[in-house]
Image: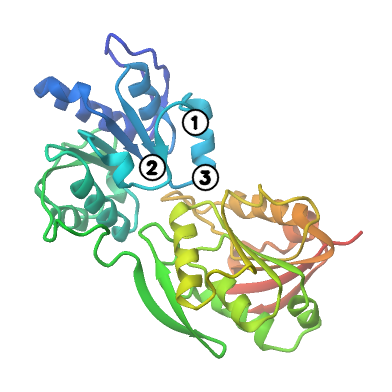
Amino acid sequence: MDGYQLMTDHPQSRTHRVATGVDRLLLDQLDELLEQSPSYRDLPVVVVNETEGTVAAELRSRGMPLRVVQDSALLFDRLRAQADLAHEPWDDAVSREILQGAGTVLYRLPRPLEAVEETAWHVARWAKETVVLLAGARQKDLQRSVNDRLGQYFGHVSASRGAYKARVIRARDPHLPDATRQTPPRIPRVNTDRVLDHELALRAYGLTFGAARVDPGTRLMLETILGTNHAFQDAIRGAGTAVDLGSGNGTVATVLGLETSIPQIIATDDSAAAVCATRATLVANGLDNNSRFAVYHQPDTKQLADASVDLVVLNPPFHHGSSAVTRQIALDLFVAAGRVLTANGLLVAVWNSGLQYRPQLERLVGPTTQLARTKSFTVTISEVTG
């Protein structure tokens, strides 16, 4: 089981909570560093994208200078409450401001190697020259190529011994091929793709779901609702306000903006990287500085009023990070969509056919019609009644 009671022997520690094996090993590696180099105790420690709040809470209980980075709006709100981090410096992305002067960075490794490369560049560019990056993951999730990505920007990269079913990669001696750059090379990622009759310019940051590509389910959904004849086509194109829920790289918001005359299009995502990518994609397609568009960093539809939109378009994720397939994320988003839709409002959704969400859509939103189905994906439209 990847969970342990964290009760460290540190004299200032008051933390007693469940920690993952990755958390435990990151803290063990930090303690080893502090024992070897006590001067690091007085330098800021930056905790990047942990999932449980255990690491930040432990460091706060020790009185260490702490900074927190969390890409997920939902997790940040949760961690800030659970770990009492309201007064700690924080950001939703690694940046010059959050990393300047930092001596140690504790990093929960993500799956996308682009995100590892992006974070490594920022740490090497903005933290102290003596910074130590401790990057942890479960052993079964750790990719060998992580070392290569870290090695692009650090002169010394090594791995800890495995413990608690986890391993930590240690990176020291930062170096940059071009120390004058203000942003990482190849970030944002740039690509072009065609949807309907539109040549899209796509942008993506390291943690952007789908990278700078059109997701195949999203493509099927857009081509179905905007490129075929069906009973709902006039209602979709005639919507007053549409929401791209879980906007990712901004494909849906951009296509709606180019293909329809919907006067208000709102894109929202839990991931700060996705929000940045959506904004960049809108700009790249000439849809910037346009009062039609708003982009929010929020877990679902939190900032939107009840019964305030006519159309929600959704391709729900079915994984959370590296976890197994879960239906709960989609179900929560169905509820969030139903809350903000007006009477007769429409939820368009595409989902993996094997997940069979139609009964849940009927129950949580309203009468549901299947518009398209392939072996991989199903496109449905649900109408709020009453």
Residue 285 image point, x, y percent: 49, 78
Residue 135 position by quadrant: top left
Q: Report the quarter where the C terminus lies.
A: bottom right
**Among all residues in the image, which is located at the extreme right?**
386
Of 295 and 360, the residue lying toward us = 295
Residue 120 vs residue 229: left or right?
Answer: left
Q: Earlier in the sequence, mark 1 or mark 2?
A: 2
- The Cα atoms of the two marked residues, 1 and 2, are separated by 12 Å
Which residue is the site of mark 2? 49
Which residue is the site of mark 3? 73
Of 7 and 170, the residue lying toward us = 170
Label 1 with label 3: CB-CB less than 8 Å? no
The answer to whether one can see residue 305 in this image is: yes
Amino acid type at circle 2 is Asn
The crowd level at tag 2 (other Cα within 10 Å; few <14, some 14-19, many 20+) is many
Q: In this view, does 264 lie above or below 33?
A: below
Which residue is the site of mark 1? 80
In the drawing, what numbered circle is on residue 292? none
Label 2 with label 3: CB-CB less than 8 Å? no
- The Cα atoms of the two marked residues, 1 and 3, are separated by 11 Å
Q: Which structural element holds mark 3?
A: helix
Q: In this view, does 374 lie above or below 136?
A: below
- The structure residue drawn at horizontal position 74% and vertical position 60%, both measured from the top left corner, is 361
Amino acid type at circle 1 is Arg
